[in-house]
Image (spheres, grey):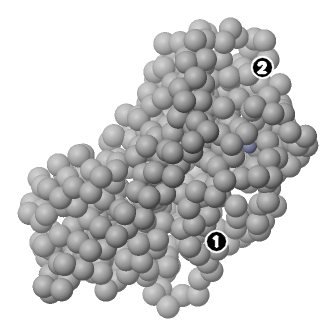
Amino acid sequence: MKNLSINKNNHNLKSGHIKKCQICGNKKLMKIIDLGNQPPCDSILDKKNQREFKYPLNFLFCKNCFLGQIDYVVPPKKLFFKKYPYRSGITKTLVEKLYSTSEMAKKKLKFSSNSLCIDIGSNDGTLLKGFKRFNFKVLGIEPTNIAKIANEDGIETIQAFFDILIAKKIRLSYGPAKVVTATNVFAHVPNLCSLIEGIKIIIDQKGVFISESHYLVDLIKTVQYDSIYHEHLKYYSLHSLIQLFKYYDLEVFDVELIKNYGGSIRVYTGNKGEYRIKKSVTDCLNQEKKFFDKSNQRLNDFRKNVVANRKEIVNIIDRYKSKGKKVVGIGCPGRCSTFLNYCEINSEKIDYIAEQKTSLKLNKFLPGMKIPIIDEKVMLNDQPELTIILSWHYHKEIIKILRKKGLKSKVLIPLPKIKII
Ligand SMILES: [Zn+2]
C-alpha cells in the first residue's frame, strides 16, 4: 500500500463530487457500478407529490487502500437528520447484536468498574445499555431527536453532532473515556478528520476505540447493493481502516468479523504502541489480499450479479401483476430505497410497504418510487399473493413473527439469492 500524500484535512469532505479516494487520495479509482440518480434514502416523503432531489450514486473501489466508496456528498442540509426515523432498539436480533459489542469488550479488555464508555451516534442508547450492565459509566452523543428517547430511558445522551468542540467540553466535564464506540458512524460522516481528532481528545492514553462498520468483503460476496446509499460514503476493508488510522497515530490491534447488518467489521484501535497487534489482524489482511487480487474478478462478478438480480426480481413481480395479483413490501429500512429505486419498482409494481405500527415512517412515502408505507395490519387483512421482504438480513425473525400474526402470503427474499418461501 502506497502512502499517497494526502493532508488529513482532506478526510473532511465537501459537498458535491469527490474526485479521489476518500482515505488515501488515490485519483485512479475503479468504477464498480452506477446505480443511477437517486434520492437520499432516508428522505421519506410526507406527501406523494413533495418535491425531492436526486444525486448520482456510483460505487467505486480504490486499489491502493481497498476502500469501497461513492463519489458524491449530498449537502448535509438536504439530508433530514432531525427526522431520521430509525431506532436501533426495535428488532430483537439487532438488540442482541448491539449487546455483543460490550460482551466482547468485557471479555477481551481489562477495565475497572465505573470506567467511562462513550458511544458516538448512540441512537436510542441500546449499545450503551449493554455496557451499563457491566458497571460502566455511560454517555451517548446523538444528533437526532432519538436522543430524547435515550434520555427518557435512563441513558444520558447529549443531543449534538460530535466534533472537536463538543469533544473538548466532554473531556472537561466527564474526564477521559476508557472505551469509545462508534457503530455505523465511521462510514457515514463526511468530516472524518474532525471525528477522529475528537475521539483522540476524549479517549484515555490507554483507552480503546471500538468501531463497527459494514464490511466491504461481505457486501461484495453477498451482492448487497442495497446497502449502497448516499449517507453511506465509505465501505471499509481492514486495509482501509488501518490506512485511515495511520494518519492519526492510531493502530488497529484486533479485528472481528461479525454478522451485524449482513456482515460487519469490528476493529479495536489504540494509541500507537499501546497494544500488541494480534494475529487476527495479519490473518484478515492476508485474506483481503487474496479476495481483492489483480484480476478484479470478485468486483466484476458483483456487478454482473447486481444486474441479474434486478432483472429477475422485476420479472417475478411482473408475472404476478400481469395476473392481477397483489405484491407488497415488508419492512422499510433505509437500504430498501436503493434497491427499489435501482430496480425501478414503483407503486404500480408494489402496492405498499408494510411496517410495524411503532414505525416513525408510517403513512409516509418511499423517496423516489413514492410507494406508500402503511401499518402491517392492512397487509395481514389483505393477504397479498406475494410479499417481498425488504429487511432481508432479518428475514428469519420477521417471517416468524408475521406467520404468528397470521400472514399466509408467499414471501420473496431478494438477496443474497432470490428465494420464495
Ligand atoms: Zn484509497
How many numbered discs sit on the rendered protein? Answer: 2
- Considering the numbered disc 2 on the image, is that residue within a helix, a strand or a loop? strand
Can I make out residue 92 in this image? yes
Q: Nearer the viewer, residue 130 or 385?
A: 385
Q: Residues within 10 Å of mark 2 (few under 14, many from 20)?
A: many
**Position in image of residue 204 (x %, y %):** 76, 20
Mark 2 highlights which residue?
A: 271
Determine which quarter of the picture holds residue 174. Answer: top right
- Please give the name of the residue rendered at 46% of the width and 71% of the height, measured from the top-left corner: 342
* Mark 2 lies within 8 Å of ligand 1 (Cβ measured): no
Contact, mark 2 vs mark 1 (Cβ under 8 Å): no
Q: Nearer the viewer, residue 20 or 341?
A: 20
Can I make out residue 163 in this image? no
Mark 1 highlights which residue?
A: 56
- Please give the name of the residue rendered at 79% of the width and 17% of the height, measured from the top-left corner: 272
- Please give the name of the residue rendered at 79% of the width and 42% of the height, measured from the top-left corner: 24
- Quarter occupied by the N terminus: top right
Determine which quarter of the picture holds residue 168. Answer: top right
**Position in image of residue 178 (x %, y %):** 68, 20
In the figure, 278 relative to 237: above or below?
above
Q: CA distance from mark 2 to mark 1?
A: 37 Å
- Quarter occupied by the C terminus: bottom left
Q: Earlier in the sequence, mark 2 or mark 1?
A: 1
Task: Look at label 2 and name its amino acid.
Answer: Asn
- Considering the numbered disc 1 on the image, is that residue within a helix, a strand or a loop? strand
